[in-house]
Amino acid sequence: MSTKNIKELEGLAAGGDVGAIYELGQRYFYGVGVELDYVKARNYFEIASERGSSGSNYFLGKIYYNGNGVQTNHLKAKEYFEKSAEADNTFSKYYLGKLYYWGDGVEKNNEKAEEYKKLVLGKPIYGNQEAGLEEFYSIYDFEGRTKEYVGELQNKVLSEYKNLFGKELSL
């Protein structure tokens, strides 16, 4: 997320800046700098999605998958996850596999769940390559592991920068 405050983002969004609209959706989704509000998040994500933001489709999928501020609707979540997966969003591929594994809003299909698992595991950040489908789609903390991995990479970069240049770098 940017360092812009909410007023700045709202001004940019009013001018049609899709990035600002998407970021406002994220801010309300996570409650960063504003009170958490899934309805506002969904509204911003819908606008950004209509304007071509594939990341917004992922968040809309999560909103409908989890029932955040809306009635849970796995079929609608699937539609958004599919749009986002077409843009190569790994998180959406994970959720699509999860939908097929559990049969949430779709016919249970372990073959499709396995296909999505392979797409996800093709990325370098996922540790348990040998997890069975049930373990992968029920216990595996996909997003948490990704955030942990990114944090590890950032720490390595910061440390290496300090070693090379003798001063701190802030991200």
Image (cartoon, rainbow, N blue to C red):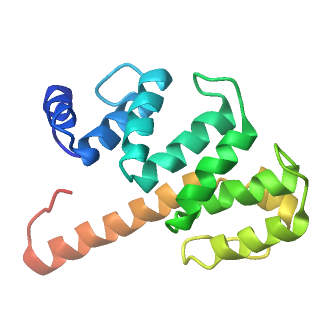
Q: Position of residue 101 (x, y in %)?
A: 85, 56
Q: Position of residue 62 (x, y in %)?
A: 59, 41
| In this picture, residue 152 sits left or right of residue 34 | right
Whether residue 72 is visible, yes or no, is yes
Most extreme residue toward the front is: 50
Q: Quadrant of the C terminus?
A: bottom left
Q: Residue at x 38, y 53 (%)?
A: 52
Which quadrant of the structure image shows residue 116? Answer: bottom right
Foreground of the two, 108 or 79: 79
Q: Residue at x 55, y 66 (%)?
A: 86
Q: Position of residue 90 (x, y in %)?
A: 56, 64
Q: Position of residue 56 (x, y in %)?
A: 45, 46
Which quadrant of the structure image shows residue 162? Answer: bottom left
Determine whether 18 is above or below 121 in the image.
Answer: above
| In this picture, residue 105 sits left or right of residue 123 | right
Q: Residue at x 74, y 40 (%)?
A: 74
Which quadrant of the structure image shows residue 72? Answer: top right
Whether residue 145 is visible, yes or no, is no
Determine whether 43 is above or below 21 in the image.
Answer: above
Determine whether 7 is above or below 58 in the image.
Answer: above
Q: Residue at x 30, y 38 (%)?
A: 21
Foreground of the two, 109 or 37: 109
Foreground of the two, 140 or 69: 69
| In this picture, residue 39 sits left or right of residue 92 | left
Foreground of the two, 159 or 123: 123
